[in-house]
Amino acid sequence: MTIAAVPPSSRVRAVRIWLTLVAALIAAMVLVGGATRLTESGLSIVEWKPVTGTLPPLGEAQWQAAFDGYKQIPQYRELNAGMTLDQFKTIFWWEWSHRLLGRVIGIAYLLPFLWFLWRGAIGAEWKLALWIIFALGALQGAVGWWMVASGLAQRTEVSQVRLATHLSLALIIYAAIVWTLRRLSDRVRQTAPVRLKATALVLLGLTFVQLYAGALVAGLRAGRVYNTWPTIDGALIPDSARLWFESPWWKNLFDNHLTVQFDHRMLAYALWALAALHMIDALRTRAGAAARGAVLLFLALTAQAALGILTVLHAAPIDLALAHQAMALVVLTLAVLQAERLTATSDPQTALDRGAAERLPSKPVLSA
């Protein structure tokens, strides 16, 4: 054995691999969550047991007890009365897998993070940001139960507002990790017109608004009604009396199936048009990597729009709905990368690199 210091660049790569893995796990979690919702499986586990809930029912008695618990909620009585134990197991496994993946993400984030902190691989500039991401992940578990609890007493499904909040928080965490990954890369920072930076940030913000609106559509099962395009409810713009019949007016934005789907469509048109303008501007100014990023973002949004139209026309079958959700993650990733690319102002040596360079030589490790 000889003693050698691990090069700072190696530690930077290790941190980036760790964050990439966590981002991939979150993306998988979002898709599993989508399948859980589409299969109406999210209320199959009626208790929140962060530790003991890691294990599924063991033996027929435990399975029956879990099934008996499900029989007490409105969803079983009103929608699934007469369901067999084997049918219950199918929806149970979806929800259990979703919750297990959440626990796996927590462990996959926290343990390597603590190790990197101990080894001094993370500069002071990034410690707070990474701790905040962890705190948001812990909050996500509580928000998930808050969402499930909304469907256990008086509803046959979870609240669409709580569902949208749960999904939005997951996407914020995902975006924060992707942004951090981008900031931890060594590259030449490029200059760009202020308007290009501004449209990139507006595109990112509008993407989040659109994802929230899409979650409301999913929570209300609004994609299974008004299955025509480009018209909706018989017109390009529905009658205002049908869009705003609930009182107070703002409830229509969250509860009215027609209004929620119409808003989702209008936001999609606005997002696509802004992405086209951003792409044209980036190409005209010969913005290099930013121009390529703008083209990729526009193409992804075009594909996403096509998937959305197909999903509506076919009344949201599970395969198209999941493809639509997966492409939404692609769009979000590209929007984050584009915004970070155009707003980065630091030099190519990252804060993480500086922290590693300051600490690691004083902490030797054993190597063969």
Image: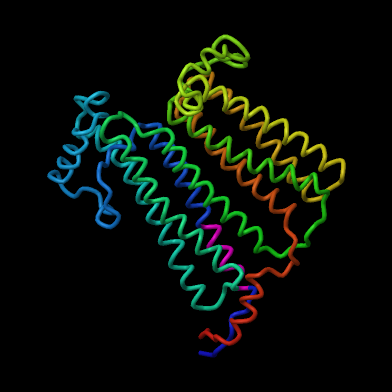
The residue depicted at 38 percent of the width and 33 percent of the height is 159
Q: Is any part of residue 368 visible from this angle?
A: no
Segment colored magenta: 10-21
The residue depicted at 64 percent of the width and 48 percent of the height is 336
The x, y position of residue 285, in whole percent, is 87, 44
Q: Is any part of residue 211 visible from this angle?
A: yes
In the visual, does 143 lie left or right of 183? Answer: left
In the visual, does 357 lie left or right of 129? Answer: right
Image position of 84 with respect to 198: above or below: above
Image position of 2 with respect to 345: above or below: below
Quarter occupied by residue 298: top right
Along the line of sight, the residue nearer the viewer: 5 or 186: 186
The residue depicted at 67 percent of the width and 33 percent of the height is 271
Quarter occupied by residue 204: top right
Q: How is the image coloured?
A: rainbow
Along the line of sight, the residue nearer the viewer: 169 or 13: 169
Along the line of sight, the residue nearer the viewer: 169 or 248: 248
Q: Is residue 254 magenta?
A: no
The residue depicted at 59 percent of the width and 63 percent of the height is 16
Q: Residue furthest toward the top?
A: 234
